[in-house]
Amino acid sequence: MAKAGGKSVAGGKRGLKRKAAAEEPQEAAVADDGAAESGAQPRKAAAFPPGFSISEIKNKQRRHLMFTRWKQQQRKEKLAAKKKLKKEREALGDKAPPKAIPKTIDNQRVYDETTVDPNDEEVAYDEATDEFASYFNRQTSPKILITTSDRPHGRTVRLCEQLSTVIPDSHVYYRRGLALKKIIPQCIARDFTDLIVINEDRKTPNGLILSHLPNGPTAHFKMSSVRLRKEIKRRGKDPTKHSPEIILNNFTTRLGHSIGRMFASLFPHNPQFIGRQVATFHNQRDYIFFRFHRYIFKSEKKVGIQELGPRFTLKLRSLQKGTFDSKYGEYEWVHKPREMDTSRRKFHL
């Protein structure tokens, strides 16, 4: 029995030695991390051979540590180069070279042949004879009907009600199961100039149909990022009944020009500047961002803005000639992702 006991004691000692030897590298790594956190000078890492990648390190903790150090070194080098360039520019003064324009997806955009030239006679003729010419010639005043899909939920209804406070002379009617083909003749008979339909999915607004009456065109948008007034932080007071100003930004192509004219025809000709309210449709990379603000003059040079809401983002899906007709309608433009989204620098609006 004593001999067996002696063997078990010796085996236990060997096991403790193996465990201590296995824990030594981990303790060393912890010591390195503690030195780095305390601000002490860390031990110099071994220089990697040329062509060596950090991803080749098998140990996950060591790999993460080396990658963090590499990122810190890159950040320091970049900051040092930036400070050096700033000192050189200050030393040169007016003779300093102009700042380099950073490359972005927007300014590297692929040129579109349909980009509108303001001095183009063909564009001017098309604008004088298109479906919106009567509005821009001040022959008609906009009157908008806003409705929803069948059986709308509370969020969609509230969005329609808030849109009616943004767009003057707009009226909200509930759908009541009527097809759009039956609603459109009734709108024309009551002198409505535009029809807006808010669609929803899973109790969330996800689509918008805008149809210009009586002869079209009709645009179908995907709607996302909807925020109602109560969901916007630091918003201003509710909007007044003054007609807002309109900003249409970055609609440069023929298709974008048509969409911009559709949005412009929703609002009256003469904005009431006393209300200091502005509705913005900003196109960026074919996403149309809608915002509604009130601006405040703080001084002669400074202006502050308050967002009033609602806000949402639109993505054009199709543009159809005439009024809404999903079965026999003729489409001017349809978004085809597999064919049109091959390049990130190609935009259509």
Image (spheres, helix red, strand yellow):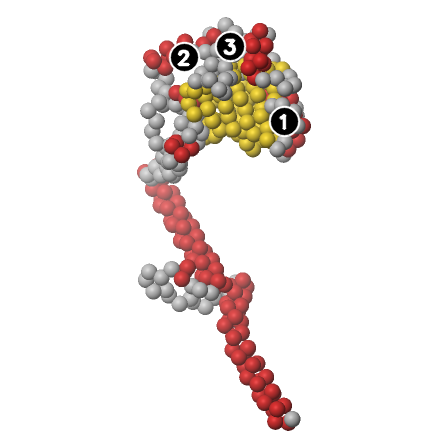
The Cα–Cα distance between marks 2 and 1, rounded to whole angstroms, is 34 Å
In-front residue for pair 239/173: 173
Circle 3 residue: 214
The amino acid pointed to by label 3 is: Pro
Marks 3 and 2 sit apart, C-alpha to C-alpha, by 17 Å
Coordinates of residue 140 in the picture (x, y in percent): 52, 7
Q: Earlier in the sequence, mark 3 or mark 2?
A: 2
Q: Nearer the viewer, mark 3 or mark 2?
A: 3
- Residue under the image location 43 percent in, 28 percent down: 335
Position in image of residue 27 (x %, y %): 53, 71
Of the numbered discs 1 and 3, the one sitting upstream in the chain is 1
Tag shown at residue 127:
2
Provide residue 308's location: percent of width, then percent of height. Answer: 61, 26
Question: For residue 156, which numbered disc appears in the image?
Answer: 1
User: 345 or 29: which is nearer to us?
Assistant: 345
- The residues tagged by marks 1 and 3 sit, at their Cα atoms, a distance apart of 26 Å
Displayed quadrant of residue 257: top left
Dot 2 amino acid type = Glu
Q: Secondary structure at mark 1?
A: helix
Mark with earlier residue (2, 1)? 2
At 51% from the left and 78% from the top, the residue drawn is: 21
> Tag 1: residue type?
Thr
**Judging from the image, what secondary structure is the residue with disc 3 in?**
loop
